Image (cartoon, coloured by chain):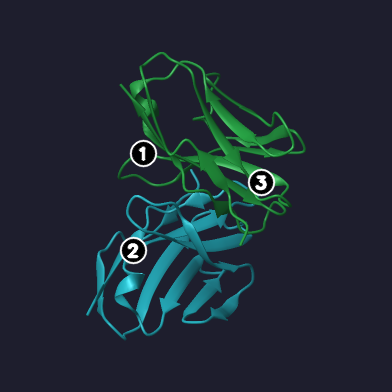
Chain colours: A green, B cyan
Amino acid sequence: EPEVTQTPSHQVTQMGQEVILRCVPISNHLYFYWYRQILGQKVEFLVSFYNNEISEKSEIFDDQFSVERPDGSNFTLKIRSTKLEDSAMYFCASSEIGNQPQHFGDGTRLSIL
Amino acid sequence: QKEVEQNSGPLSVPEGAIASLNCTYSDRGSQSFFWYRQYSGKSPELIMSIYSNGDKEDGRFTAQLNKASQYVSLLIRDSQPSDSATYLCAVNPNSGYALNFGKGTSLLVTP
């Protein structure tokens, strides 16, 4: 069964450094998403991406965040200058069309020191 | 603020029993509703989607939606210890496709 793949599984970074989280969505899916989950809290939406542009973003997704689809398969989330509070699990998801079920990758655990 | 509310639990049921998980949402225009299962330290795994009022069955799982009451539920029949996990209710608001998640209900199925 097709799945969303994310790399790396765990990323440890010093505060202030840039990180790039990578995702390969399911191949025939058109909508891509990033969510995060701080330990013990609920899953929170960050951004959605369709047709090579951001379609929605939350208040969390400020100027420190950016997304990109650099080629036909990868979808990346960049955090420009990480803060301690960016420590969380980051999940990539994709869906065939907008209101269809979103399928999640295994996540990247981001630890900021 | 558009909210999705779930009882945090834990909900404890004996093996073989029916587990009933509930969720309410505040955005009356919400169109799409999903149940995800999340094991500790893992990612959300889709169980069910439901879009119209009524019941939808898939194996041991039944999702129920009542848009007038802004209420969606998940029934798990013949509960197994492997069903022990946190169950997340997720709602698409009226505008856009971002999922708004509840905090989840922890389910414990005891042998």
Say which amino acid is labelled 3.
Answer: Gly
Residue A32 vertical position relative to residue B108 in the rendered view, above or below: above
For this view, does A27 lie left or right of residue B34? right
Chain identity of mark 1: A
Q: Which residue is mark 1?
A: A38
Q: Are marks 1 and 2 on the same chain?
A: no
Alpha-carbon span between mark 3 and mark 1? 23 Å
Tell me how far mark 1 sits from mark 2, CA to CA: 18 Å
Q: The residue marked by circle 3 belongs to what chain? A: B
Label annotation for residue B85: 2
Q: Quadrant of residue B91?
A: bottom right
- Is A56 in front, or is A7? A7
Horizontal arrangement in the rendering, residue B33 relative to residue B18 (left or right): right
- The reply to whether discs 1 and 2 touch (Cβ–Cβ < 8 Å) is no
Camera-side mark, 2 or 3: 2
The residue at 70%/49% (across/down) is: A27
Q: Name the secondary structure under disc 3.
A: loop
* Three-letter code, disc 1: Ile
Tag in front: 3 or 1: 1
Q: On the rendered structure, is B67 left or right of B71?
A: right
- Amino acid type at circle 2 is Ala
Instruction: Report whether mark 3 lies on the same chain as mark 1.
Output: no
Q: Position of residue A20 (x, y in %)?
A: 52, 26
Tell me the number on the disc at residue B96. 3
Front-most of A33 and A74? A74
Residue at 63% x, 49% y is A94
Quarter of the image with the N terminus of chain A is: bottom right
Q: What is the chain identity of the residue bearing mark 2?
A: B
